[in-house]
């Protein structure tokens, strides 16, 4: 009867997440009961198991509390709430196509960047005009296309980029597009600021870019914090298109 209870308890514990039941010989149990001492080997195994369990829970807790930029894209939970907002978001996606058509195409990298801007406009238009189960996949395609454009811009601005960074960007692009966009956008901002210092003719364009970037960032954050306010996303589209158009001056 005692052995049957032990087997039942062990099977129940095996279904508990993070619990690993270590089988032992019945002779070890008898030795514990008779001597009243805990064998050193069993004590060591239990200590190691508890430490591993604590480490796993710590890592899981930290990973669950990671910022949104490190989380996969699962689709937008709000936006395009009525026909007017949907139309506005689609129409304000078209300027990205126009900016891509007008972008310089001096070499292969600049051509890739120009075509990626056209892809941003197309992906954004398709997402905002979509409904149903395809919407979450098109949201992922939208963010991924934006990240691709930032990577292409980095390659167009610099002939040589760190190979490790580009490899990491390519690896993270499908699963963490926001993080990739943030890294390469920061690199572009630094390059733009340096060029504006070296070339006074770029100062006016750089100021336009800075103002549009600040305005676009404000629209983007407000759209996330106040989803009930309409047309904020369309405003972000326009501000971002102006900022991207200013970046084309760097490639001339």
Image (spheres, grey):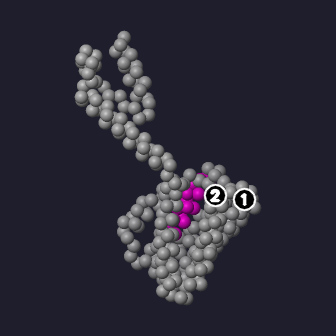
Would you say residue 145 sits in the magenta stretch? yes
Q: Does residue 219 lie above or below 135 as drawn?
A: below
For the question of whether residue 99 can be seen, the reply is no
Residue under numbered circle 2 = 224
Q: Is residue 227 left or right of residue 145?
A: right
Q: Are marks 1 and 2 in contact (CB under 8 Å)?
A: no
Residue 96 location in percent, x, y? 61, 72
Depth check, front residue: 88 or 22: 22
Q: Identify the residue at horizontal 71%, vertical 63% (top origin).
A: 231
Q: Identify the residue at horizontal 55%, vertical 57% (top origin).
A: 140
Q: Which quarter of the figure has residue 80?
A: bottom right
Depth check, front residue: 20 or 99: 20
Residue under numbered circle 1 = 229
Depth check, front residue: 199 or 125: 199
Q: Which quarter of the figure has residue 37?
A: top left
Q: Identify the residue at horizontal 46%, vertical 48% (top origin).
A: 63
Residue stretch in magenta: 134-149
Find the distance from the CA under tag 1 to the CA under tag 2: 10 Å
Q: Does residue 92 lie above or below 103 as drawn?
A: above
For the question of whether residue 178 can be seen, the reply is yes
Magenta region, main secondary structure: helix
Q: Earlier in the sequence, mark 1 or mark 2?
A: 2
Residue 171 location in percent, x, y? 42, 60
Q: Is residue 34 left or right of residue 50?
A: left
* Quadrant (top left/top right/bottom left/bottom right) for the N terminus: top left
């Amino acid at each position: 009867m005692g052995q049957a209870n032990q087997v039942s308890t062990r099977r129940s514990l095996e279904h508990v997440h993070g619990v690993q039941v270590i089988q032992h010989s019945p002779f070890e149990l008898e030795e514990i009961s008779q001597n009243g001492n805990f064998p050193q080997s069993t004590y060591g195994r239990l200590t190691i198991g508890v430490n591993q369990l604590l480490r796993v829970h710590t890592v899981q807790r930290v990973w669950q509390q990671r910022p949104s930029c490190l989380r996969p894209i699962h689709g937008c939970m709000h936006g395009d709430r009525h026909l007017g907002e949907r139309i506005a978001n689609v129409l304000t996606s078209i300027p990205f196509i126009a900016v891509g058509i007008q972008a310089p195409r001096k070499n292969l990298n600049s051509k890739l960047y120009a075509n990626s801007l056209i892809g941003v406009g197309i992906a954004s238009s398709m997402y905002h005009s979509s409904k149903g189960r395809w919407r979450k996949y098109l949201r992922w395609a939208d963010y991924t296309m934006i990240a691709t454009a930032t990577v292409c811009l980095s390659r167009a601005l610099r002939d040589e980029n760190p190979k490790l960074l580009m490899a990491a960007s390519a690896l993270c692009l499908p699963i963490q597009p926001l993080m990739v966009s943030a890294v390469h956008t920061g690199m572009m901002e630094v390059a733009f600021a340096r060029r504006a210092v070296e070339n006074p003719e770029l100062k006016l364009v750089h100021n336009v870019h800075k103002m549009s970037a600040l305005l676009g960032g404000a629209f983007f954050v407000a759209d996330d914090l106040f989803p009930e306010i309409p047309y904020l996303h369309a405003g972000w589209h326009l501000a971002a298109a102006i900022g991207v158009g200013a970046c084309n001056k760097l490639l001339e």
